[in-house]
Image (cartoon, coloured by chain):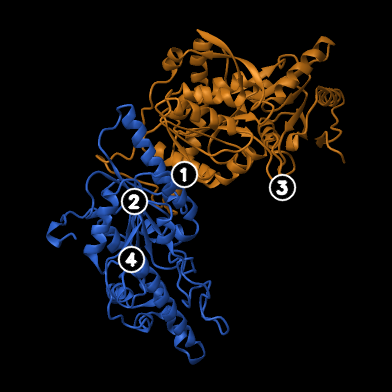
Chain colours: A orange, B blue
């Protein structure tokens, strides 16, 4: 049973968090995430949740308090964006290293300088190697659905890792959409209270965060790699369970038209929605194009992307962040690595777009599709790395 | 004040740790754990005490102990306190738990001051103990906001032109007291019963409490390792380290020093001040003595002492 409501991306994540029986929220305001924190504060101050809200003095302290609370056995939620995420960068690694199943809503925003409050993926991409499971939602419905699933994935004994649910700042954080939300009783079927593996119990004292030198550190990190790898199966299992409950289908990647496509676009988040609309239009004109949208960016869905690109001859990978000095954007580099590993002859080119919230229009996307189709026909890549929508 | 026979014989901070001989932090940790009143969680900022007491797979702590990072012991303590509150609210936890955060002067005066201020302002019920050895001793004796004027450190060396640290020590307890917390105090491990009593008072206080304790460091202050407690006593007896408490805003001097020794008696035991005994820098000893006199006058005036 679900109910239709109008929610912004921020409100949808806050509402899902409210339904998730959270013990502790420690968070700090930053545009465009602020409404997530404000909405949750209202639940606390109106007595709608049992949650202890720690209104910290910085994002660094937010994640520090979250780690402390998570180690105590609490279910913990926080939210951040941009400079705030950058400030908690140090703590992100500790959250995953200490295996804290914290869930964080991230409203993606550009990084300074120059200061800019609009959406791009520079913030999360800057922390992409922090050991967190990283999910990108395409729309507000997905933001809600993934937040509920995130707690189950994070707290699974095979995983025990933090999860970031990303929404495009502004495009999703502030846009109100029609959302099907589950009743609280339905959510309870998915999520009861957290059952931690081990906590800082005063009856059974343990030492957490000990010093590991050359003799143990590497093994601890290797286990994290293993946990991230294990999480793919857990994500798929939770998605299946969630589909049974809500009717919404999820997994590691989402695809449109890959079965018979000649060319495609691979991108994260809300841009995939634009790409699907454009692809549909092009397909009505007989142009065989596809869209591949990884829902999960970390762990990177290698096998799924390899399968989805089996029939495609040319692929444009769109990055909404710049890896300065690298040959390609981070997403494109990952795609190229997996295709090379699989011996694929697929032609790939990279488009950097949307920095600082620069709009990517359906016209822009259509020209990328046309270029990919042209590459599929000729086998020639016109521009391996292009910047879409910038004044040169 | 607490008496020796009232202290538990159990050692919750065990031997076998790797702190240096004569290190004040080990003594302080051991005494602190003799002041516990019930289930207690320790949060430890990165620093000497942390790296020396928990070299995996060993630990010196027989109580739950958490280390996250350098600058955030107060924030981590906030999260743990919040978690116990929330767990109690949904009947998943019953007993009251005390939380003690340990941090050095670098993790407190400098990089951790924001997290300390935030936690004090929010009113979390925990005790913050700053063991102050007056420099970043763990990373190799760099100056901090707690390093006294004139002290030579590796980043404020005794140069040919600049004789050690030009600046003066921060008033940390003044900063804490300004948050309006229930209890803040200074202490010295040489006066063990005063220190342990203060830990107990800090735990009993409602909301956040702070104890700022002098911690001798033979390596960084460069004194003989068998002189640590003598150093800690001299710090008080020269009025260099006034021992007082601020209870609900009321200052009280706990150790009166009617006939102080000159600060030079404290300085001459320590290699970090050796350069001040050269003729061309000797005026710096006067500067330090003046700072001690002024600080004592300020503190005793707040304590309404003559």
Q: Are callouts 1 and 4 both on one chain?
A: no
**Residue A36 location in percent, x, y?**
56, 30
Which numbered disc, 3 or 1, marks the residue that appears first in the sequence? 1
As displayed, is residue A63 above or below residue B215?
above
Q: What is the number of the mark on residue A64?
A: 1
**Chain under label 2?**
B
Element on which disc 2 rests: loop
Q: Which of marks 2 and 4 is nearer the N terminus?
A: 2
Kindly report the distance in space between the C-alpha atoms of the residues bearing marks 3 and 2.
42 Å
For the residues bearing labels 3 and 1, Cβ distance under 8 angstroms: no
Mark 3 burial class by Cα count in 10 Å: few <14, some 14-19, many 20+: few
Residue at point 46% right, 54% down?
Answer: B70
Q: Mark 3 points at which residue?
A: A113
What label does residue B303 carry, if any? 4
**Residue mark closest to the camera, 3 vs 2:** 2
Question: Which residue does the numbered mark 2 point to in the structure image?
Answer: B182
Which quarter shows the N terminus of chain B? bottom left
Question: In which chain is the residue bearing label 1?
Answer: A
Looking at the rendered structure, the secondary structure element under dot 4 is loop
Please say if the residues under marks 2 and 1 sit with CB atoms less than 8 Å apart: no
Tag 1: Cα neighbours inside 10 Å, few (<14), some, or many (≥20)?
many
Marks 3 and 2 belong to one chain: no
> Dot 1: what SS?
helix
| Tag count | 4
Which dot, 2 or 4, sits closer to the camera? 4
Alpha carbon separation for disc pair 2 and 1: 24 Å
Where residue A116 appears, as percent x and y from the top left, is 71, 41
């Amino acid at each position: 049973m679900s109910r239709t409501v109008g929610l912004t991306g921020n409100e949808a994540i806050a509402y899902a968090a409210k339904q998730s029986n959270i013990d502790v929220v420690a968070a700090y305001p930053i545009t465009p995430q602020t409404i997530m924190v404000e909405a949750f504060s209202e639940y606390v101050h109106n007595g709608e949740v049992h949650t202890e809200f720690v209104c910290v003095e910085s994002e660094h302290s937010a994640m520090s308090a979250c780690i402390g609370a998570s180690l105590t056995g609490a279910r913990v939620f926080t939210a951040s964006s941009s400079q705030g995420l950058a400030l908690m960068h140090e703590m992100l690694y500790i959250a995953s290293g200490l295996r804290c199943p914290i869930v964080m809503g991230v409203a993606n925003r550009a990084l300074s300088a120059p200061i800019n409050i609009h959406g791009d993926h520079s913030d999360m991409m800057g922390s992409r190697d922090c050991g967190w499971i990283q999910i990108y939602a395409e729309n507000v419905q997905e933001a809600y659905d993934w937040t509920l699933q995130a707690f189950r994935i994070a707290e699974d004994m095979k995983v025990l890792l933090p999860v970031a649910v990303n929404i495009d700042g502004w495009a999703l954080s502030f846009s109100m959409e029609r959302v099907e939300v589950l009743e609280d009783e339905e959510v309870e079927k998915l999520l009861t209270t957290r059952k931690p593996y081990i906590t800082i119990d005063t009856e059974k004292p343990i030492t957490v965060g000990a010093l590991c030198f050359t003799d143990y550190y590497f093994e601890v990190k290797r286990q994290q790699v293993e946990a991230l790898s294990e999480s793919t199966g857990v994500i798929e299992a939770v998605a299946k369970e969630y589909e049974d409950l809500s009717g919404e289908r999820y997994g590691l990647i989402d695809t449109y038209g890959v079965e018979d496509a000649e060319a495609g676009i691979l991108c994260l988040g809300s841009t995939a929605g634009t790409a699907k609309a454009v692809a549909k239009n092009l397909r009505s004109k007989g142009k065989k194009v596809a869209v591949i949208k990884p829902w999960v960016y970390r762990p990177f869905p290698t096998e799924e992307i390899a399968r989805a690109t089996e029939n495609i001859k040319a692929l444009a990978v769109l990055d909404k962040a710049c890896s300065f000095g690298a040959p390609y954007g981070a997403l494109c580099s990952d795609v190229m690595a997996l295709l090379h590993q699989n011996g694929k002859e697929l032609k790939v080119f990279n488009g950097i777009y949307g920095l600082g919230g620069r709009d990517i229009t359906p016209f822009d996307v259509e020209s990328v599709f046309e270029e990919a189709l042209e590459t599929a026909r000729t086998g020639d890549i016109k521009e391996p790395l292009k910047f879409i929508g910038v004044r040169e | 004040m607490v008496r020796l026979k009232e202290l538990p014989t159990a050692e919750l901070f065990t031997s076998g740790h790797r702190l240096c001989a004569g290190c004040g932090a080990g003594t302080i940790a051991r005494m602190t754990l003799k002041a516990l009143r019930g289930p207690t969680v320790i949060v430890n900022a990165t620093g000497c005490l942390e790296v020396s007491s928990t070299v995996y797979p060993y630990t010196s702590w027989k109580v739950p102990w958490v280390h996250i990072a350098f600058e955030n012991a107060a924030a981590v303590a906030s999260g743990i306190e919040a978690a116990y509150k929330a767990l109690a609210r949904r009947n998943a936890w019953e007993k009251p738990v005390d939380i003690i955060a340990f941090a050095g002067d670098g993790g407190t005066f400098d990089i951790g001051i924001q997290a300390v201020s935030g936690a004090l302002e929010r009113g979390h019920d925990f005790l913050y103990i700053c063991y102050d050895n007056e420099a970043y001793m763990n990373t190799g004796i760099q100056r901090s906001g707690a390093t006294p004027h004139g002290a030579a450190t590796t980043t404020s060396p005794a140069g040919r032109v600049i004789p050690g640290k030009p600046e003066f020590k921060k008033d940390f307890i003044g900063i804490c007291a300004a948050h309006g917390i229930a209890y803040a105090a200074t202490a010295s491990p040489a006066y063990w019963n005063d220190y342990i009593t203060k830990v107990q008072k800090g735990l009993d206080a409602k909301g956040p409490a702070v104890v700022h304790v002098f911690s001798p460091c033979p390596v960084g202050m460069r004194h003989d390792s068998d002189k640590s407690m003598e150093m800690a006593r001299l710090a008080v007896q020269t009025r260099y380290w006034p021992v007082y408490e601020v209870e609900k805003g009321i200052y009280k001097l706990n150790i009166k020093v009617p006939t102080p020794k000159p600060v030079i008696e404290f300085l001459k035991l320590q290699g970090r001040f050796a350069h001040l005994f050269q003729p061309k820098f000797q005026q710096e000893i006067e500067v330090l003595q003046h700072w001690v006199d002024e600080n004592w006058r300020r503190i005793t005036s707040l304590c309404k002492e003559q």
